[in-house]
Image (cartoon, rainbow, N blue to C red):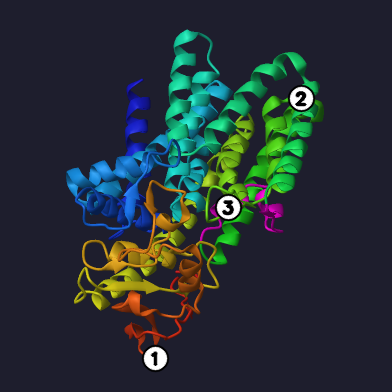
């Protein structure tokens, strides 16, 4: 028992190292979340005309936690504490769920779960979804146990998860119901679930404008979750797919095809693959000004945990039990050098804006054509925190978050079309926008350009991450 406790403590410490190994955590939307925590303070102080805080039931828990930590400890500690807490909740929820399903701790899969923990969803900064996923995994752990107390704990966790994001707790409920019914209905529940997925796709596509992508073919394997930035991560995805395939072959050899097909966890993986393939990646909901995006890309995070839960039953040989470790070390070496490069870009932005004031509005329009996660999209939000105005911050104009813009204001663009033009290039500067600056690419690197009324903004390509190391 003492040895296990020490292993858990050491792993927990190792787990949060990536939250502290760089000057700042590089996760796309995290910068926007902390900037909006600052905006919330300005609203409470009466210094943010045109902005308001609205009560919402979901997509808010992480923001509330971050805002409270911001007030207590400041912006930098708030980000590290909130993100570290989310990381621990997600990883241990995934690890305990895998162990619960398989009747014992599966330490050899810990490196794989760590890679998922710091996967694409984490680095996109989808913090509310990420936190909801972790809480939902814990809800599944308790929901699979019998008794009133575990059921009450699962219900409380699902409610908390819903306040962060609605999709993960809905997924957890579906998984829990399937596991319970599969014990009695066997293949009938599987066929009913297939029909449900097809019906859901029809209902969504017939009711709302949607978009699907060819990339969902890759997502149906869940290996896309470790393709974070540049093309080098494709090698990591291939390596992960190979190791998962070896484990699947071990199960097939030991149990046979009939046993695999009859496993409810294998069936859940098949259903998840089908859902990822068929459900649209983007849905335009009428209550929001910006589509609900990256739906299937987010869901591969939870899908990956399900795959690990099923594969953990394999009687893996010694070489396979250690094979995830070198793959994880290679993965995290890539993550380290790439986030270090992105921190250098953010530092350059800080230097360029150091003489600006809270009367000056700034934005940038960068794209890295080699990277899957576009981290440069919101770095300026954190750079401007308390020193300038990040004019193209997107949250207030979307109506998806608690900070809302109800009209033109001096702090953020209120019109979603104008926000899009600033992000993609081609925005015509208005006199009411001034003073307005754009961080752009120049012959010597990044530079700060002061704009005049009538100017057309530009869009820049910026490759910040190295090819390998």
**Is label 1 in a helix, a strand or a loop?**
loop
Quadrant of the image containing the N terminus: top left
**Can you say whether 226 is above or below 13 in the image?**
below
- Residue 278 in sight in this render: no
Is 341 covered by the magenta stretch?
A: no
* Image marks 2 and 3: residues in contact by CB distance under 8 Å: no
- Whichever of callouts 1 and 2 sits on the residue coming sooner in the sequence is 2
**Can you say whether 72 is above or below 231 in the image?**
above
**Is label 3 in a helix, a strand or a loop?**
loop
Is 292 situated left or right of 338 in this image? Answer: right
**Span of residues in magenta:** 209-228
Nearer the camera: disc 2 or disc 3: 3
Picture coordinates of residue 85 (x, y %)? Answer: 34, 39
**Is label 2 in a helix, a strand or a loop?**
helix
- Residue beneath disc 3: 294
Separation (CA) of disc 2 from disc 3: 31 Å
What residue occupies the far top of the structure in this picture?
147
- Residue beneath disc 2: 262
- Whichever of callouts 1 and 3 sits on the residue coming sooner in the sequence is 3
Residue beneath the point at 68% across and 43% down: 246
Q: Residues within 10 Å of mark 2 (few under 14, many from 20)?
A: few
Picture coordinates of residue 27 (x, y %)? Answer: 41, 56
Nearer the camera: disc 1 or disc 3: 3
Front residue of 359/263: it is 359
Give the numbered dot on residue 443. 1
- Residue 358 in sight in this render: yes
**Can you say whether 248 is above or below 97 in the image?**
below
């Amino acid at each position: 028992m003492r040895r296990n406790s020490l292993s858990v403590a050491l792993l927990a410490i190792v787990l949060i190292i990536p939250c502290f190994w760089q000057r700042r955590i590089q996760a796309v939307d995290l910068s926007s979340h902390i900037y909006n925590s600052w905006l919330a303070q300005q609203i409470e102080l009466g210094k943010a005309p045109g902005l308001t805080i609205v009560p919402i039931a979901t997509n808010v828990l992480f923001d509330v936690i971050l805002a409270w930590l911001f007030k207590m400890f400041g912006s930098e500690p708030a980000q590290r504490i909130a993100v570290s807490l989310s990381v621990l909740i997600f990883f241990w929820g995934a690890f305990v769920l895998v162990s619960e399903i398989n009747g014992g701790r599966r330490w050899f899969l810990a490196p794989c779960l760590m890679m998922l923990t710091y996967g694409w969803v984490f680095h996109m900064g989808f913090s509310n979804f990420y936190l909801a996923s972790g809480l939902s995994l814990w809800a599944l752990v308790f929901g699979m146990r019998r008794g009133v107390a575990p059921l009450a704990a699962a219900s409380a966790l699902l409610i908390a998860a819903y306040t962060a994001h609605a999709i993960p707790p809905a997924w957890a409920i579906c998984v829990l119901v399937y596991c319970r019914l599969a014990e009695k209905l066997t293949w009938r529940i599987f066929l009913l679930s297939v029909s449900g997925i097809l019906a859901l796709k029809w209902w969504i596509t017939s009711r709302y404008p949607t978009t699907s992508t060819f990339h969902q073919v890759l997502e149906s394997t869940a290996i896309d979750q470790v393709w974070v930035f540049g093309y080098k991560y494709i090698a990591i995805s291939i390596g992960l797919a190979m190791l998962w395939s070896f484990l699947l072959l071990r199960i097939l050899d030991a149990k046979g095809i009939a046993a695999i097909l009859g496993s409810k966890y294998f069936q859940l993986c098949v259903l998840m693959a089908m859902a990822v393939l068929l459900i649209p990646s983007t849905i335009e909901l009428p209550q929001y000004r910006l589509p609900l995006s990256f739906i299937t890309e987010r869901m591969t995070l939870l899908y990956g945990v399900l795959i690990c839960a099923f594969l953990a039953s394999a009687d893996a040989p010694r070489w396979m039990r250690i094979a995830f470790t070198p793959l994880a070390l290679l993965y995290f070496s890539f993550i380290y050098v790439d986030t270090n490069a992105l921190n250098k870009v953010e530092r350059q932005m800080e230097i360029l804006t150091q003489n600006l004031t809270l009367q000056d509005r700034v934005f940038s329009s960068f794209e890295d054509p080699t990277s899957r996660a576009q981290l440069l999209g919101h770095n300026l939000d954190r750079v401007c925190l308390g020193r300038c105005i990040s004019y193209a911050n997107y949250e207030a104009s979307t109506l998806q978050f608690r900070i809302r813009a109800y009209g033109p204001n001096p702090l953020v663009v209120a019109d979603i079309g104008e926000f899009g033009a600033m992000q993609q290039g081609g925005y015509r500067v208005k006199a009411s926008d001034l003073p307005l600056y754009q961080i752009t690419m120049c012959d010597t690197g990044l530079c700060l350009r002061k704009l005049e009324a009538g100017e057309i903004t530009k869009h820049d390509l910026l490759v910040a991450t190295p090819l390998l190391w």
